[in-house]
């Protein structure tokens, strides 16, 4: 009887130790479950039903990534451009009276709108002129690119819109008029 009592006591102590260990593991699992739920809630709040909210406002550029394309982690899927930094790249035609210069005023024609602009930069020659196709016999000619900043506060053309640029040759016209006046001998009473 003593022996059976000792075996029973030993079994009770062993089971109490197992219960204590199980209670400790359950508490640890409950804590882990709470952390997991908090993390899941944070991820769901960040996902916001698939909406992506940019930290700044601006213009979304043309797609850097295409639908279905596999991307490496860290690859941008879009670019946000500053609304206040709008410019037009003008592929200056090779057939012109004078060369454009930084500071020249131009008109940017977009639909029925005429927007005043000013040449802010003359970029290097470009081999990629999207103008009329060259004939089979000769290669495409390179052209200069003038970067135009829009002067008016009105709505700028949409990104990658086709616009037309008109540069007025006031200085050239004034110079030619001066030559004609000197040649004709007119003194202007």
Image (spheres, rainbow, N blue to C red):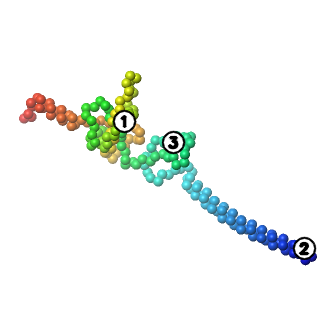
- The earlier-in-sequence mark between 2 and 1 is 2
Q: Could you say whether the residue bearing mark 2 is in a helix, strand or loop? A: helix
Residue 19 position (above or below residue 184): below
Relative depth, front residue between 8 and 87: 8
Q: Could you say whether the residue bearing mark 3 is in a helix, strand or loop? A: loop
User: Residue 150 at what x, y percent from top left?
Assistant: 33, 44
Does 9 sit left or right of 112 as displayed? Answer: right
For the residues marked 2 and 1, what is the alpha-carbon distance in whole angstroms? Answer: 99 Å
Residue 115 showing in the rendered view: no
Residue 131 position (above or below residue 67): above
- Spot the residue most to the right: 1
Given contact means CB atoms under 8 Å apart, are the residues at marks 3 and 1 in contact?
A: no
- The earlier-in-sequence mark between 3 and 1 is 3
The quarter of the picture where the C terminus appears is: top left
- The earlier-in-sequence mark between 3 and 2 is 2
Which of the numbered marks, if any, corresponds to residue 1? none
Q: Identify residue for label 3.
A: 65
Which is closer to the viewer, label 3 or label 2? 2
Residue, x 84% and y 73% (percent of image)?
A: 10
Q: Residue 148 appears in which quarter of the rendering?
A: top left
- Spot the residue most to the bottom: 2
For the residues marked 3 and 2, what is the alpha-carbon distance in whole angstroms? Answer: 76 Å
Residue, x 81% and y 70% (percent of image)?
A: 14
Given contact means CB atoms under 8 Å apart, are the residues at marks 3 and 2 in contact?
A: no
Which of the numbered marks, if any, corresponds to residue 4? 2
Residue 161 position (above or below residue 52): above
Q: Identify residue for label 1.
A: 126
């Amino acid at each position: 009887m003593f022996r059976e009592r000792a075996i029973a006591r030993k079994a009770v102590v062993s089971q109490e130790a197992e219960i204590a260990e199980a209670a400790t593991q359950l508490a640890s699992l409950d804590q882990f479950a709470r952390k997991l739920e908090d993390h899941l809630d944070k991820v769901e709040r960040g996902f916001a039903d698939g909406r992506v909210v940019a930290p700044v406002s601006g213009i979304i550029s043309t797609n850097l990534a295409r639908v279905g394309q596999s991307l490496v982690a860290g690859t941008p899927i879009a670019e946000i451009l500053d609304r206040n930094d709008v410019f037009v790249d003008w592929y200056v035609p090779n057939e012109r009276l004078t060369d454009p210069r930084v500071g020249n005023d131009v008109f940017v024609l977009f639909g029925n709108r005429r927007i005043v602009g000013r040449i802010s930069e003359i970029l290097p020659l470009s081999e990629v002129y999207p103008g009329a196709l060259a004939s089979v016999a000769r290669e495409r000619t390179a052209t200069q690119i003038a970067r135009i900043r829009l002067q008016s506060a009105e709505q700028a053309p949409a990104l990658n819109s086709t616009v037309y640029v008109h540069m007025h040759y006031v200085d050239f016209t004034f110079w030619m008029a001066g030559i004609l006046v000197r040649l004709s001998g007119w003194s202007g009473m």
